[in-house]
Amino acid sequence: MSGGRAKALNIEQLTFRYQKDTPTIIDIPKWQVDAGDKIFVSGQSGSGKSTLLNLICGTLTPTSGTITLLEKPFSSLSSAKRDEFRAQHIGVVFQQFNLIPYLSVRQNVELAAYFGKGVSKESRELLRNNMSMLQLSEQLLEQRADQLSVGQQQRVAILRALINQPEIIIADEPTSALDSQAQAGFIQLLLDSVRQTQCTLVFVSHDIGLAQHFEKHIRLDQILNSEPSHVA
Ligand SMILES: Nc1ncnc2c1ncn2[C@@H]1O[C@H](COP(=O)(O)OP(=O)(O)OP(=O)(O)O)[C@@H](O)[C@H]1O
């Protein structure tokens, strides 16, 4: 099924609970995502989607088990090394876009470059190319993030996620505030951008209707251990 393709993500025996005396939220015996896949992960509200993404991004540490990202033993790195790895190899598009409101578009994107692969002639060229791919005018570069329309903010969030040429992009319900037409447009834009850069996309949402846009769809409950004994 997955053949001999390189794995972008390999999760083994992963469990996570927020505190010692609270229930296990994540219990995944095994889950792999092939490099280059664009996968949609659905799950009901409160089922653990954001928790899983935070584990994959390294902002949370597993209670047990391992997460291998791009063939690196990501979850065994120190928190500082995980931050460094994330900045260089993972692009994240959040639910609320998380742009810094008082910074310009350029500053928002270059801040990510600064913490990632660095601001350089190459990163500026990439920024210009990606702006044209996302149909954003260059005049927008000096505009403050809080002066952008929602549609522009979305595209700037993609710009920022792509600036370090990540091998994997993680998207956490970035369409939840949009109507269905705008959702479809945003997802197509994201998929087109990701296809051009050949990176892996893990897109998470409770809205199962969005699955139609993706080649692969998995429900979180299909990868979670269904044994009731995992609740503390
Ligand atoms: N910081 C936290 N401390 C303790 N429990 C938490 C924390 N964050 C989330 N949880 C709990 O973990 C469970 C999963 O939450 P999570 O946010 O991962 O779900 P979700 O599927 O992303 O939900 P939604 O679709 O509503 O965003 C919930 O029961 C939630 O209450």
Image (cartoon, grey):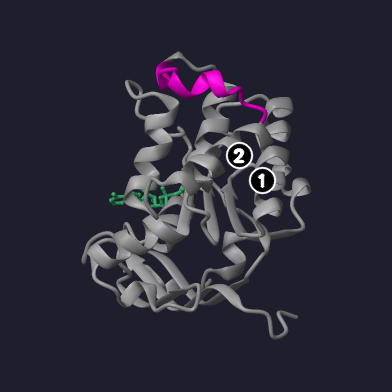
Q: Residue at x 73, y 84 (%)?
A: 3
Residue 143 forms part of the magenta stretch: yes
- The foreground one among 48 and 120 is 120
The extreme front residue here reads 121
* In-image side of 108 versus 181 (left or right): left
- Inspect the image, locate mark 1, and give the three-letter code of the amino acid beneath it: Ser
- The foreground one among 6 and 137 is 137
Q: Position of residue 143 (x, y in %)?
A: 44, 17
* In-image side of 148 versus 55 (left or right): right
Q: Residue at x 39, y 33 (%)?
A: 108
Q: Which residue is mark 2?
A: 130
Q: Position of residue 87 (x, y in %)?
A: 37, 55
Q: Which residues are magenta?
A: 135-146
Q: Quadrant of residue 110?
A: top left
Asked if disc 2 and disc 1 are in contact, CB closer than 8 Å, the reply is yes
Q: Quadrant of residue 24?
A: bottom left
**Does residue 206 show up?**
yes
Helix, strand or loop under label 1? helix
Neighbour tally class for label 2: few under 14, some 14-19, many 20 plus, Cα within 10 Å: many
